[in-house]
Image: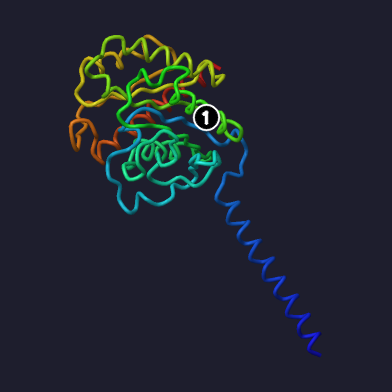
Amino acid sequence: MRKKTHYIKAIMLSFCWIFIISVQAQKEKQRTYQGKKENLHVYLLIGQSNMAGRAPFSENEATVIPRCFLLNGKDSWEPAKNPLNIYSTIRKGAGMQKLNPGYSFSLEMLKKHKDISLGLVVNAKGGTKIEQWKKDTRFYKEAVRRTQEAQKSGTLKGILWHQGESNSGNPDGYLEKLKDLITSLRKDLDAPDLPFIAGQVNKVPKINAQIAKLPKKVSHTAFVSSKDLKTIDRWHFNQQSIHLLGKQYAIEMLTLRLKADKKR
C-alpha cells in the first residue's frame, strides 16, 4: 500500500512539474515576437544623449508598450518599455537612461498601423560626436550588427538619428559627414532607399541649418525641428518636448513611407 501511495505521489509530482514548465514556456513565448517577419517593422534609433534619453518618465510610461518589442542584450525581442536605451551596447550608466523620442514615436506609428508590430533597436550614447559614428568605428559596427540581428525576424523600415550637440564647437562639414553615414548604413544594411530622419538639437544654428538641408541633399530623408522645444538644461529636452519630438519623427516617417508607396 505504501509503495502504491508513493507511486501515485511521484506521478502527481511529475505532472505538477510538467505543468509548471509548460506555463513558464508559454510565458517566455509571449515575451518575444512570434509573428511574421513582414509584420514586425524594425527601426534603428541612434545618436547621443537625447536619443539615449535624459527626460524623466512617469510610472504609467514605464509600462510595456503594446505591440512593441525591444532588442535586448541577448539580441532577441522582448516587450518594449522605458528606458528604451537600456540594452544599448555602448551606453553610459543604466541610471542615466530615461525617456527618449522612441516612446512617443512608437505610440504614434502603432496608432496609424494597427495590423503590425514594432521592433526597436536602440543603440545610442550620450556625449558622442558624429565622427565616432562613421563607418568602421565601434559605434557604427554595433548599430549595424544589432540591426542585422533584428532583420532576421523583422523588416527594417527606417532610422532615427539625433546628434549634433557634441559637434557644436566644430560644426563645419557636419552635413557631409551625415551624408556619408547615411550612405554607409544603407549599403551595409542592404537598403538603398531606407528612410532616414535626423533631429535638430537645442539652439545650435550652425548644426541645425545643415540638418535642415538634408532632405534636399539626400533622397528618402527628412528632419524634425527643435523650434519651440523646451529643455531641462543646456542640451536635454524635457518630457513634453521629447514627446513632441517623437511624434514629429513618426509624422515624417509616415510621410516618407507614403511617398515611397506611391512610387511603387
User: Could you say where residue 225 lies in the image, as x and y percent from the top left?
Assistant: 27, 24
Residue pictured at 32% horizontal, 22% vertical: 129
Identify the image quadrant of residue 14: bottom right
Image position of 246 with respect to 10: above or below: above
213 lies above or below 80: above
**Disc 1: CA contacts within 10 A as few (<14), some (14-19) or many (>=20):** many
Image coordinates of residue 169 in percent, x first then y, are: 22, 17
The residue pinned by badge 1 equals 147
Q: Position of residue 174 (x, y in %)?
A: 31, 13
The residue shown at (36%, 29%) is 249
Q: Is residue 163 above or below residue 218?
A: below
Residue 142 vertical position relative to residue 11 in the rendered view, above or below: above
Q: Quadrant of the N terminus?
A: bottom right
Q: 118 left or right of 160?
A: right
Q: Which is more toward the observer, 213 or 27?
A: 27
- Closer to us: 90 or 23: 90
